């Protein structure tokens, strides 16, 4: 099984998938692509099932759509800018958002790729910084109190707004906001405002 | 360099994909101007990715892998819209996408003799997305909001009771915060306003307009 390799060491695992993705890009290597599929498809399916009822009902469709995009866009992947997992996650987020709007018959001239521009900075130190951030975030996430982590899960994986989370957990909106702010501070994610 | 930014809630909802479309467009436009928020957004995506990797993997049948392998040679979908880098480079591509042509081709409605508004269709039926053109030195009459008003300055500058805002600045006003945005004297101000509920003029001269300020989200 692909997912037993380097499960505990974030850095090594990232590099492994980055290499895999680069091989897919350079050689249109289908065997390497199948490895990526076996690792990421179950996560993308979980991501779909965690989302809205609409996304959950179309989970396998989302898996297909995301993995085909991964194949088609692989040459655009730059290992200096992001870990393979982050790159694939953003594709999954974009596809889930677009799919939801499509299923809701949202008539819009804007797609998710327009809303979240790809990072264009080529500065090397930024790239190094980003990798360090990714490892640190993963480590610190483990130390986050459950009540903060739970809210981040609902926002990022279940795709719920802060108000929806407040309603669901029967908490005042202010409490949800302040827990997110506390989490940001612990994870050192956003500038203090 | 922008001095006013989206708050933590907005940035998190934007990066995670939970923010309403019209509001996301507004945050995305701010990112064009703001290195600091671009970095925050990158880090929030890494947070999303870390949570994604921690999900409990769900069983995927081999048949799905075969289906996908069979579709790898399909024609790729056409690439998404990219800026055609027109000479009109003070008009961001995302806005160009929402309007057909130039600022001057838009259908403007007069809000007062000095303030014009043009509503753009984003497909978001809960939020009104509009461009405001305020003549140099003119004001939008004092008003309050039932919901949240997001403003992003595109050209010129305006000030209100709490500060002065220039191109790229992102201003959040919540319900019951009363303000009177006034364009600076030097030039006209163009900004985007995203509303999730109608605004309400508090000045007696303009109150009669209130019943006509229905939200026009589309």
Image (spheres, coloured by chain):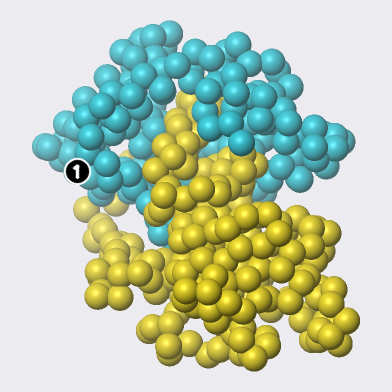
Q: Which residue is more in the foreground, B88 or B58?
A: B88
Q: Is residue B170 left or right of residue A136?
A: right
Residue A161 screen position, x and y as percent: 68, 45
Task: Name the tint of chain A in the rendering.
Answer: cyan
The residue under the point 70% across, 18% down is A146
Q: Callout 1: few (<14), some (14-19), or many (20+) C-alpha neighbours within 10 Å?
A: some
A6 to B114, vertically: above or below: above
Q: Secondary structure at mark 1?
A: helix
Chain label for disc 1: A
Q: Which residue is more in the foreground, A45 or A12?
A: A12
The residue under the point 81% across, 73% down is B200
B187 to A149, vertically: above or below: below
Q: Which residue is more in the foreground, B91 or B203?
A: B203
Residue A49 screen position, x and y as percent: 60, 39
Residue A32 screen position, x and y as percent: 22, 29
Residue A192 screen position, x and y as percent: 58, 31
The residue under the point 35% across, 69% down is B90
Q: Which residue is mark 1?
A: A75
Residue A180 appears in the figure = yes
Q: Seen from this angle, which residue lies furthest front?
A: B185
The quarter of the rendered structure image containing the C terminus of chain B is: bottom right
The residue under the point 58% across, 77% down is B137
Q: Which chain is yellow?
A: B
């Amino acid at each position: 099984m692909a997912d037993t390799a380097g499960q505990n060491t974030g850095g090594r695992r990232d590099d492994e998938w980055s290499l895999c993705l680069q091989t897919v890009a350079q050689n249109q290597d289908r065997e390497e692509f199948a490895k990526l599929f076996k690792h990421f498809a179950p996560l993308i399916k979980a991501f779909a099932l965690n989302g809205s009822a609409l996304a959950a009902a179309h989970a396998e469709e989302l898996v297909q759509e995301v993995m085909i995009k991964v194949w088609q866009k692989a040459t655009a992947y730059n290992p200096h800018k992001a870990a393979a997992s982050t790159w694939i996650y953003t594709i999954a987020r974009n596809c889930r958002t677009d799919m939801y709007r499509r299923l809701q018959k949202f008539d819009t001239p804007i797609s998710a790729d327009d809303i979240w521009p790809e990072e264009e900075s080529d500065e090397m130190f930024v790239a190094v910084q980003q990798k360090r951030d990714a490892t640190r975030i993963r480590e610190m996430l483990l130390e986050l109190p459950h009540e903060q982590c739970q809210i981040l899960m609902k926002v990022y994986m279940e795709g719920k707004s802060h108000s929806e989370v407040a309603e669901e957990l029967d908490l005042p909106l202010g409490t949800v906001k302040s827990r997110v702010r506390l989490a940001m501070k612990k994870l050192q994610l956003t500038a203090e405002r | 360099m922008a001095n006013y930014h989206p708050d933590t809630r907005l940035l998190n909802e934007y990066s995670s994909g939970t923010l309403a479309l019209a509001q996301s467009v507004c945050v995305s436009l701010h990112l064009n101007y703001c290195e600091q928020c671009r970095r925050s957004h990158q880090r929030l995506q890494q947070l999303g990715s870390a949570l994604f990797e921690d999900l409990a993997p769900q069983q995927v049948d081999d048949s799905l892998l075969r289906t996908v392998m069979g579709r790898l040679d399909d024609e790729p979908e056409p690439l998404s819209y990219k800026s055609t880098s027109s000479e009109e480079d003070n008009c961001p591509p995302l806005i160009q996408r929402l309007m057909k042509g130039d600022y001057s081709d838009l259908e403007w409605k007069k809000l007062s003799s000095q303030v014009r508004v043009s509503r753009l269709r984003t497909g978001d039926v809960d939020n009104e997305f509009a461009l405001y053109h305020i003549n140099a030195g003119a004001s939008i009459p004092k008003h309050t909001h039932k919901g949240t008003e997001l403003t992003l300055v595109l050209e010129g500058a305006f000030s209100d009771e709490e500060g002065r805002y220039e191109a790229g600045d992102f201003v959040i006003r919540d319900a019951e915060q009363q303000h009177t945005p006034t364009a600076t004297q030097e030039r006209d101000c163009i900004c985007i306003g995203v509303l999730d509920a109608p605004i309400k003029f508090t000045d007696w001269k303009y109150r009669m307009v209130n019943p006509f300020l229905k939200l026009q989200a589309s």
